[in-house]
Every structure is written in structure tokens, then in C-alpha cells.
Amino acid sequence: MASSREEAGRSGARRQVSLTTVAERAGVSIATVSRVVNGVANKASVDTIARVRAAIDELGYRPSGAGQALRRRESRIVAVIAANLANPAMSAITASTEAALREAGYVMALCDSHDSADLQDEYLREMRAQLVSAFVLLGAVESPVLDQIMAAGETVLFVNREHPHNVPASYVGIDNRIAGRDVAEQVAAWQAKHVLVIHGPISSSATRERVNMFRKRLGSLLPDAGIDVRGSMSPDHLKTGFELASCRLNDTGHAPDVIFCLSDLIAYGAARALREREIGVPETCRIIGFDDNPLNEWIAPWLSSVRVPYEDFGDAIVSCLKDAWAKGEVSRTFLQHRLIVRS
């Protein structure tokens, strides 16, 4: 009598064993089978894992082909992994993305990696086990599982930050180099002599591109200007702005002419440090932020800021995903930013 594997082998040309078939044979859910197949079985018992693997062996299940077919044809879930949802900019992007995905008939599964490579990998593994149709990484960091998913040809879209290794990959965001240049030209127009730049983790490609181009352009326009760049690895932007502005004041004893902050939250923290020293903003020190939070018109009329059209991200993300699903092509979409200058 032929074994179950032999029977499965002879019938392979007629039908493809599915996750559902394996789940029924093992007496578990489809999600449990998917987790075992994708190496995220830490939530299953040893006995459950053994039953699933036995069913896979008996049925001759081949996960790669079946999983890819399911992702292409059936899954309506898109995984969105954000680096820091406490940042209003990222919250605005995810809100826009959810609305656009829902309008297109998809469901968003949202995770917060807190800018941690380990946590990003944990979510990538879990979302892969759920056979999501795409991964949208809002602020990706370098991590092993990300490399695996890219190598496997999964649909991955980078938003706001480029691929950590700067390799060709689909991207939606602003042109951060041009944004840094625009800020430098405004600072040069103010004829600033002393400039402080405050930024968060430099691991972000967006931060690096903005800071590097700002320094390069301002150096060419105002060669004699002093540019003091200070950064922090803390994800707490308010605290970063306050502490680094305070350190600068302690070190020099005077306020810079301009502080360029790589987020509006950093700018709020820096402004508080100045005001605690009774330094007028913007009478003595001008501040330029980044993002242009909609609340700025109400609570920070003194803050100039680079306005990023976060409300447009969702449609652009869905458009890029559709191109990737239909053509398998890398696409890059640059949205239009604008420097808002307030007195």
C-alpha cells in the first residue's frame, strides 16, 4: 500500500496542498500552521508544533509556493510597521494610510517598533506568518529579518526613510536633501552667524540627508557661520530638544541666532530651554522645525517649519503598492514639501 506521502506526490500535479488542508490534518488553526512554517512558533506548544510538522510531512506541503499564491491572490492585510507612533508625524502618516487602504479594500495591521531592530524583526516575522500582502515600513532600521524578506522578493515599501542599506527599493516620502537645502537658504537669508542644529538618532536616513545637505549648503552660502550640530539617540524628541539646547547655552553662555530642529517636537523642547533662560523666541533666537504640525498655527506661531504633506501619503502608498503587485517594479514617489516661515 502506498504511503500518504507517495499519494500526495502522485496527486501533486492535480492539486496544491494548502495551509487549510494542513491545518485540518493537524487539528489547528491556519494561523498556527503559518507561524510554524515561518518560524514564529513560540506561542504554540511542543505537541502542536510536532502535529503541524507531521501533517506538513505527510501531505508534502511546500510553503513557498502556496504562501506566495495566498499573498498575491487572497490576503487583504497590509502590515504597517512604524518606528515611533508617539511622533505626531508618524501618526498622521498612518492615519492617511489606513484611510487609503480601507478605500482600496485592504485592512491595515499596525505595529510600533519603537526604532528597535529586535522589535521590528519580531513584527516582521509575525506579519509574515499572517501572510500579509505587503510590508510598509514607516521609518525602517537595519535588521536581519528585513534583509531576509527583501531577499525573498516580498513586497516591501519604505516610507519617510530610505532602505537602511541605501539599495534600490520602493519609497514614498519627501526629498530630504532638497528640504535640508531649503532650510539652509532661509538661514543664509537671515545672515545667521551662530547656528545650532539639533537632531534625533542619526541612524535615520532622513535625518542624515537633511543635516548633511543643510551643512553643505549653508557652508557654501555663509562660510564664516558657526554650525554646531548636536544629536541624541533618545526617541524622546521633546527631551532631546530641551536638553541639547540647554547644553549649548551652558557651553557658550549665549543663544545662537538660529536653531534648526529636525522635528517640531525637538523645536518645542528647545524653545522651552530658551524661555527658561528668558531668551526671546523669535526676537533673539529664531527656530526652524520639521513637519509643521497643524497645531503650530495655534500654539507655536513663532515656529518656522518644513511642511510635509502627510495627508497625501496614504494615496501615494496605495498607488506604489498596486504598481508593485501588478508589475513587480521598484517605484519612488517624492511628495512636495514647503518651508513655512513665521515671524
Image (cartoon, helix red, strand yellow):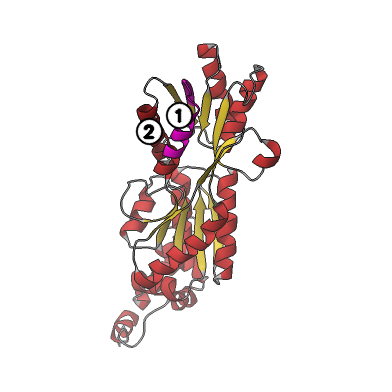
Magenta stretch containing residue 258, yes or no?
Answer: no
Task: Give amino acid for label 1.
Answer: Ala
- Segment tinted magenta in the rendering: 181-196
- Residue 275 x, y percent position in the rendering: 66, 22
Asked whether residue 154 appears in the rendered view, the answer is yes
Q: Is residue 20 above or below residue 32?
A: below
Q: Is residue 287 above or below residue 253?
A: below
Q: Is residue 330 left or right of residue 244?
A: left
Query: What's the mark number on residue 62?
Result: none
- Residue 232 x, y percent position in the rendering: 48, 29
Q: Which residue is mark 2?
A: 217
- Residue 47 x, y percent position in the rendering: 47, 63
- Residue under the point 36% across and 76% down: 58
Q: Is residue 330 left or right of residue 199?
A: left
Q: Is residue 172 above or below residue 184?
A: below
Q: CA distance from mark 2 to mark 1?
A: 9 Å
Magenta stretch containing residue 184, yes or no?
Answer: yes
Q: Look at the numbered discs 2 and 1 and tell me whether their residues touch, using CB distance below 8 Å.
A: yes
Task: Give amino acid for label 2.
Answer: Arg
Count the marks: 2
In this view, the mark in front (2 or 1): 1
Q: Earlier in the sequence, mark 2 or mark 1?
A: 1
Callout 1: helix, strand or loop? Answer: helix
- Residue 342 x, y percent position in the rendering: 61, 36
Asked whether residue 35 appears in the rendered view, the answer is no
Frontmost residue, 231 versus 235: 231
- Residue under the point 63% across and 23% down: 283
Q: Which residue is mark 1?
A: 188
- State which quadrant residue 219 falls in: top left
- Residue under the point 55% across and 72% down: 105
Q: Quadrant of the C terminus?
A: top right
